[in-house]
Amino acid sequence: MITSRTNDKIKYIEKLKQKSSFRKEEGFFVVEGIRMIREVPGNLRKELYLTEKALSDHPELKKWCDYVETVSESVMEKLADTKTPQGMVALVRIPEPEYGAGEGARSGGQPLYLILDGLQDPGNTGTLIRTAEAVGATAVFLSRNSADPYSPKVVRSTMGTIFRVPVRICDDLPQAIRELKQSGVAVFGTHLAGTDFFAADLTGPLAFLIGSEGRGLSEEVAAEADHLLRIPMEGSVESLNAAVSGSVVAYEAYRQRKCR
């Protein structure tokens, strides 16, 4: 049992939780809680740390991976990122995205991508990754200045979808968009200057560009769009939350494809 809060393994996990660059360098991230830990595929499991009580409540976790270690309640308080910890955290490999730019959606239809440009809010980012799975999207692309999809808050927000939807962090997002366009994917940007998106044909291979919460799409990314679309709104509302607007347009594409 690990009882020291300054143990090297504990400090390593703390650093993974706190630093995106360290997660990228090491190729690991941290998940917490029984629901998320059960979602982790076997090939991504690295290490599991849990209290004796948590192990007693979930004895099946003894065989969760090759390295399972108990820790004191005090150590778990340091490791946990939630206000009401469940007594377990796991070290997990960052999955390699498995997709091709010309592949169909996982639901078997036309390719559909969600491309997030500068989204900083972890909740919005996690919600859109969940939405991607719900609509059968091919993958989610994120600009480097978006919230890290493997940060603890984003991981929790995905509710396990982070293990099922390919996620690509792009150092050069405009170039990644151009590669999609070269493969025959039409690119639609959500933008206040766009046309009514309900009139758009969203049944073919496509990608949606979703801008940041404060400033929307950057000029550089918006310039890569084949079409700019605006969600109609009543009253004095000018824009929607990024996760809401991204989900609305993704579900309209999903609806159109189902109704063909």
Image (cartoon, grey):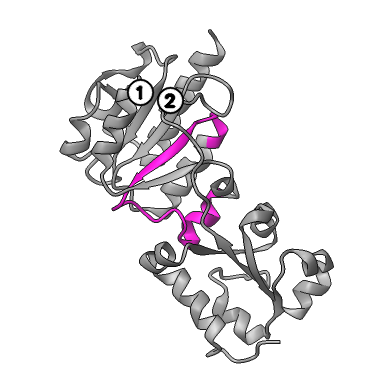
Q: Is residue 74 above or below residue 44?
A: below
Query: Which mark is first along the chain, 1 or 2?
Result: 2
In the image shown, does 20 or 51 lie closer to the viewer? 20
Determine contact: label 2, label 1, CB under 8 Å: yes
Residue picked out by circle 2: 102
Q: How many marks?
A: 2
Q: Is residue 122 above or below residue 193?
A: below
Give the amino acid at mark 1.
Ser
Tell me if residue 143 is in the magenta stretch: yes
Residue 7 in sight: yes
Position above or below: 105 against 162: above
Q: In this view of the protein, can residue 237 be seen by the observer?
A: no
Q: Which residue is mark 1?
A: 183
Whole-percent x and y of residue 22?
40, 69
Q: Which mark is residue 202?
A: none
Q: Position of residue 103 (x, y in %)?
A: 48, 26
Nearest the viewer among 110 and 145 is: 110
Q: Residues within 10 Å of mark 1 (few under 14, many from 20)?
A: few
Residue at 55% x, 10% y: name it. 259
Q: Is residue 229 left or right of residue 168?
A: left
The quadrant of the picture occupied by the N terminus is bottom right
Residue sitting at x 38%, y 41%: 141
The answer to whether 253 appears left or right of 133 in the picture is left
Q: How far apart are the two marked residues, 2 and 1, measured between alpha carbons?
A: 6 Å
Q: Position of residue 35 (x, y in %)?
A: 68, 56
Q: Position of residue 199 (x, y in %)?
A: 35, 11
Q: How crowded is the residue under tag 2: few (<14 C-alpha within 10 Å), some, or many (20+)?
A: some
Instruction: Check if residue 130 falls in the magenta segment.
Output: no
Magenta residues, start to end? 133-158
